[in-house]
Image: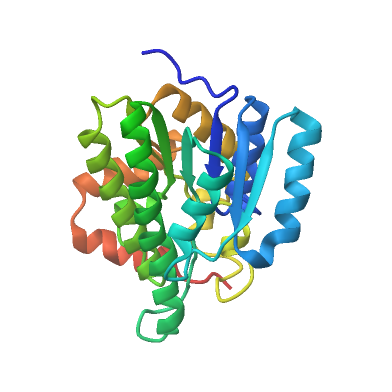
Amino acid sequence: MSRYELKDKHVLITGASSGIGKELSRCFAKEGAHCVLSAHPSEAPALSELSGELESRYGIKTWSFGVDLAGEDGPKKLYDEVKAHVPVIDVLVNNAGLMVYGDFHQADISRQLTLVHVNIRALTLLMHLFLKDMAARRDGRILNVSSVSAFQPTVHHAVYGASKAFVQSLSEAVNEEVRRSGVKVCTLNPSYTNTPLIKGGDFPERLWWYAVSGLADPAIIAQKGVRALKKGKALYIPGFKNWIIHILLPRISSRKIINFFSYHALKSRL
């Protein structure tokens, strides 16, 4: 299978202002792709700085859009604004996401519902809107930044793990639906990564699980993710150890054991 060439393609990256999204933007720009950067309106200065960096370093074009994807009209607003300035999006990268740490019944429900709006609703709407265009052209790629949390319950941040399970199931099903259309839907499934998503706020400074997994470098995750996208991998878990832990072991272990282990491994390590 030939690799998907990114040079002169137009790539939309949500959540591009920091973390994996920022590093993905750098990787796509390095490949010669023009970058359409999106983030929450409050992140406009960071987007502007990144835009200038990418244009000066890699000689590509960029566009920036500050849109709140948690809003009712956020995803459609982003789609319409992007289409008004960049008629063709070759690659959609659904990277924007939120995290809420804490036991479900104790964590603020409004924040957990906002997580659902961003991690699930916005991603689904953006996929639906841009996939129609890609299918009509019979060309395109969608990269959904999922997580190894998609493969088993994540105790103490249950809604986050559930949202990634949704993303995983949706991505794999839709990828099968469009397999003859010239479009591919892929997922990038890193383990815990050193990004603002798990820094500050209510997320613990350390989890017991870090003793096993450590914290991945977002730049390395992004590099591997773009390589996997170019190869057309439908599901990519960076690191063989993570594949064993999150794919193999759950298949040979009981749900009771997996949930018990998750409860203790994902507790704060003081």
Which one is nearer the viewer's eye here, 142 or 242? 142
Q: Residue at x 46, y 78 (%)?
A: 111
Residue 132, above or below 149: above
Res. 217 in view? no
In this rendered view, identify the residue nearer to me: 207 or 41. 41
Residue in the picture at 26% in, 49% down: 169
Q: Is residue 211 above or below residue 93?
A: below
Residue 38: percent from left, percent from top? 59, 53
Residue at 47% from the left image edge and 68% from the top image edge: 70
State which quadrant residue 66 falls in. bottom right
Q: State the image coordinates of residue 197 (x, y, percent, origin top left).
A: 57, 62
Total marks drawn? 0
Give the quadrant of the N terminus: top left
The picture quadrant where one finds residue 117 is bottom left
Left or right, 188 with reference to 85: left
Asked whether residue 173 is in view, the answer is yes
Q: Position of residue 187 (x, y in %)?
A: 39, 41
For the point 42% across and 70% down, the residue is 72
Q: For this rendering, which residue is in front, 172 or 197?
A: 172
Question: Is 39 on the left-hand or right-hand side of 180?
Answer: right
